[in-house]
Each structure stands twice: as C-alpha cells, then as structure tokens.
Image (cartoon, helix red, strand yellow):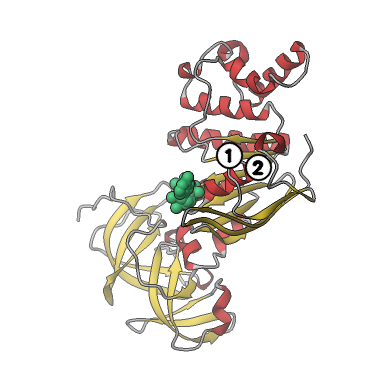
Amino acid sequence: MQAIETLEIRGMCRDFGTTAALQNFSLDIRGGTFVTLLGPSGCGKSTALNCLAGLLELTDGEIILNGKPIQDTPPEKRGFGMVFQNYALFPHLNVISNVSYGLDNKPMPRSERDLRVRWALDLVHLDMDEFGRRFPGQLSGGQQQRLAIARTIVLEPSLLLLDEPLSNLDAKLRGEMRIEIKRLHKELALTTVYVTHDQSEAMSLSDVVVVMRKGQIEQVGTPQDIYNCPRSLYVADFMGYANRIPVTLVGPEGNEWLVETETGHRLHGISTFDGSADWKPGERLLACSKPEDMQVEAPGTANRLSGSVHLVEFVGQAYESVVRLDDNDNLQLLVQSQNTLTQESPVSFGIRPGRLLLFPYEAPSGKRSGQRLSAVSTAVSA
Ligand code: ATP
C-alpha cells in the first residue's frame, strides 16, 4: 500500500438533511503522525472519520492523498483501515479466520497468509496458539479490541482510523490498551486518526489534537498547546479549566493583565485568547484555572484568595476541595492541597498569574464538560 506522505483535507463538509454535521473541515496530516479528533458527543468526530474512510460521501470539499484527490475513490480502494467502537468482529469466525478474512481476496501462498496472521496477532499481543481457535464470544473485551486491531493492521493500511476504540472497556483495560495503541503506532509508524471525547486519552496518545465543536474545528495543536494555551473558553472548559471567576479588566501590566473581581479583589492573569489585543479597560472577562493550579500550599504566589472549605474529595495525587470565597460566597472554586482539609475551616490559596487564563465573559450554561468535583464528592465531617 502506498505510504502516506501528506493527507490534505480541504473544506470537507457533510450534511444530513438540514443538519450540517461537518462544516469546512480543513486539516493537513503528515505521514506517520497520530492525530486525534476530540470533542463532545455530536460534534462531528465520527462523521469526519467516516468521510475520510469513504463510508460517507462529502457534501463538499476535497481529500488529497499524496497530491491526488481521493474523495470519489471507493473505501476499498483507499487502502485505509478502520476499527469501530463496537469492534464489528465476525461472531461465527474464530480468531484466525477473523484476521485472515480480509486477506481472502489477495493472491498469496497459504504460508505467507499464515505468517501475516501470526505477525498481526503477535503485534497486538494475542497468542495465536492460545487464542487462535476461539470465537469472539470467548474473548474478553480487551482481547476483542486487540483482535479488531489485528484484523485491520493485517491488511497493512496506509492510514489507521480508530473510532472511540476504548469506550467499551473498563478504566484499567482502557489504560492498558492506550499503551498498546501507542506502542503499535511507534512500532509501525502508521499514520493514525483517532476519535475520542476523552481529553486524557487525546493528551497521552497524540502528536496533534483537533478539538471540534458543532461540526467545525475549534483548535488544532500539540497536546501541550491545547492543554496549556486553549484559545477559547470552549477548549479551556474541555481541558479542565473548571474554575471561572467573573472579572473586569483594569489594564495591561507588563506581560500580564490586571483584573478585578466583582468584590474589588485584584488578580494578575494572562490571555491565550486570539482577540485579546482588542481588549479595553472595563471589559468583562472570565479568569479561568485548573484546580491543580489553585494550590493551598503556594506561599508567596502573587494572586491570593481566601475562603472556607465546603467539600473535600481525594483525587489520587492530592485532595480537591470546593471552597466558597470569603467575599463572595456565591462563587465556589476547586482548590487542591497535599493534605486533607476540614469542612468549614478557613483556607488561603494561590495561583500563579501564568496559570490564570482570561477569556471573554460568557454566562454559565448548565453542566460543563470540565467540571471535576462529582456527585460522589463526600462532605467531610467537621
Ligand atoms: P459521538 O461522540 O456521540 O459518537 P460524534 O462527535 O461522533 O458523536 P457524529 O456522529 O459525527 O458526532 O454526529 C454529528 C452530527 O450529525 C450529530 O448532530 C448527529 O445527530 C448527526 N448525524 C450523524 N449521523 C447522522 C445520520 N446518519 N443521519 C442524520 N444525522 C446524523
């Protein structure tokens, strides 16, 4: 199969009746990269993947593979491989037959076919002697997932398309399979487009993350770019910037911005928002931060706030508390500490200006994807 040097997607659109599922989607993919399409349910991720695979026709736009348009090429002639969320295994075929099925119409000696099946199963760490004669129903979820990947890579696709491949697995298996997918990508240097709504999956696997919103691309960048420098409140929300403090802009101060909370408390922040050059004093903004950047043990930090502890949750490496601000008890922030805190106790916490990101004000709208402290939060006893 022809290796991918460049895959250019130009103005790709797909409508379903009056629903514009994909609008003006343009992206350049270099050969060998791992690209993840990230976004909430319904934002058009699967539509984009199916258009790339050729399973859906484009309403408009072009897909150019190594300089040649392929949007009218049928799926079987594109040489791409797709792994579906539900695995789509043949239940009546055993493991070996599931993998060799795609090789049936390729002329090759039986010995070579057997070698390729063994190679593909070895790659996904499924032992052919132990599992080869089993049927999919006799495999665990993780083993079925490995089989689905083996069945695709045995055909040596030039592009691997993965549609939420880990969503049916439990948390531990998801973690293991994530490492397996990363290893496979490294070993095969296979250009990969991966769909997920899980930001941690996107961060750990990808060279490039494409954040999608309502059928359009909201931001493209490395995981570090997207995580540290979200260009919109939408991306920040998706990346877990769960704390939002309504503020008013006072003005620039060096490389930072000086802002004032509704109760007159002054804070320093920065902006990764593209339109911030036009901001004027008096502008209504939201100062956003991740709970892990609001630290109780942060002596000397320029930005300091104080409040009282409402709820505490253990989140693994730290404790995360809901804190009500002293001067505005309508405002609750998620704050982290190394030690547990006592309910209703006073607490002072700090945030570095470089981790307080400013965005244009938007009114709160229901549940946000970045919200962390869940319904399982436990109130600590006083
Ligand atoms: P999920 O994470 O839930 O799979 P997604 O981001 O992959 O979501 P898509 O499945 O691409 O989203 O759907 C994008 C939009 O297109 C949604 O509004 C969806 O309802 C609509 N859509 C998708 N497929 C069809 C279809 N066959 N007919 C009509 N509308 C569709």
Pick the quarter of the image with the C terminus.
bottom left
Does 246 sit above or below residue 199?
below
Q: Amino acid at mark 1?
A: Leu
Does 166 sit above or below residue 247?
above
Q: Residues within 10 Å of mark 1 (few under 14, many from 20)?
A: many
Give residue 17's position: percent from left, percent from top: 47, 53
Comparing 216 with 293, the one in front is 216
Give residue 170's position: percent from left, percent from top: 43, 34
Give residue 369's position: percent from left, percent from top: 41, 56
Dot 1 falls on a residue whose secondary structure is: strand
Q: Which residue is mark 2?
A: 192
Dot 2 falls on a residue whose secondary structure is: strand
Comparing 270 with 304, the one in front is 270
Residue at 48% across, 74% down: 358
Q: Which residue is mark 1?
A: 162
Whether pointer 1 and pointer 2 mark residues with C-beta atoms closer than 8 Å, the reply is: yes
Is residue 197 among the parts visible in the rendering? no
